[in-house]
Amino acid sequence: MLFNRAKSIEGNIDKYLENILKSSLIFEAGLREYFEGKREEFEKRTVEIQKLESESDEIRRDIKYKLYKELLIPDARGDVLGLLETMDDVIDTAEMVMVRFSIEEPKVWPELKDDFIELTAASTKCVAELVAAARAFFREITKVADCLVKVHFWEHEADKIEKRIMRKAFEGDFIDKLSLKVHMRYFAERISLLADKAEDVADRLDIYTIKRSI
């Protein structure tokens, strides 16, 4: 266990990863509420994820301080910080997307509702598998590879659903304005971006895992 030499930050890293996972679940629940017309519930979720993002920033800074000031795990310190910094992009993206929905209030046509819900679920599963991979990196490194396979799978699924939404929006006749078709494409891209960010972190985590295994 990497934590054997850094017990004082074990709890903080666990909490940080827990917040990443929780943010993706808030993301999924909040967007589902938006698609179902539950705007008040959605806005509460948006406030919740903003608070969670701020809390996670504080935890990450505290981990960074302890790693450097207390000279903890010097041989792996750079990789740990790199992992936490890139995982911060995941929670930032989840927050950003919800805020964009809150501000722009896009209309989601009934013909696309189920696709958007499916896309959100795929992106969320991608993040869940990333968190599982990160936990394995710190505790049982032999399990990282299996989790990363699942990250790539769900990112690919999200990409397929994103393209499906685009085709339906642009090829169908239920949206009569090009600007509205573009709006649907934009928000499909934003939701899928969460899976893209998770895969980016997974690629870096793969490299860190190889370095620790050598």
Image (cartoon, grey):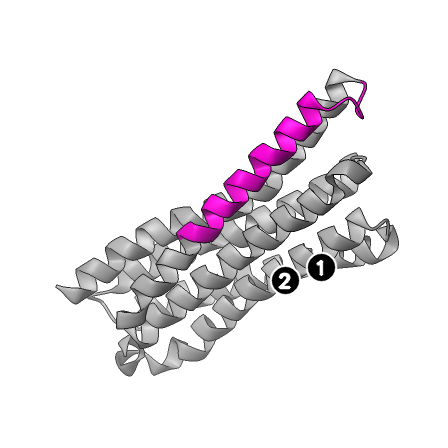
> Is 89 left, or right, of 41 in this rendering?
left
Verify CB contact (< 8 Å) between mark 2 and mark 1: yes
Residue 156's spot in the image, x, y percent?
46, 45
- Residue at screen point 80% across, 36% down: 109
- The residue at which mark 1 appears reads as 29
Q: Dot 2 surroundings within 10 Å: few (below 14), some, or many (20 or more)?
A: many
Q: Toward the viewer: 187 or 164? A: 164
Residue 158's spot in the image, x, y percent?
53, 45
- Residue at screen point 77% across, 34% down: 104
Residue 61's spot in the image, x, y percent?
46, 62
Examine the rendering and report whether any part of residue 72 can be seen.
Answer: no
Q: The disc labelled 1 sits on which kind of residue?
A: Ala
Q: The disc labelled 2 sits on which kind of residue?
A: Leu
Residue 36's spot in the image, x, y percent?
82, 51
Residue 169 within the magenta-colored segment of the rendering: yes
Examine the rendering and report whether any part of residue 122 can be seen.
Answer: yes
- The residue at which mark 2 appears reads as 25
Q: Is residue 152 above or below residue 1?
A: above
- Residue at screen point 69% across, 49% down: 117
User: Which quadrant holds the N terminus?
Assistant: bottom left
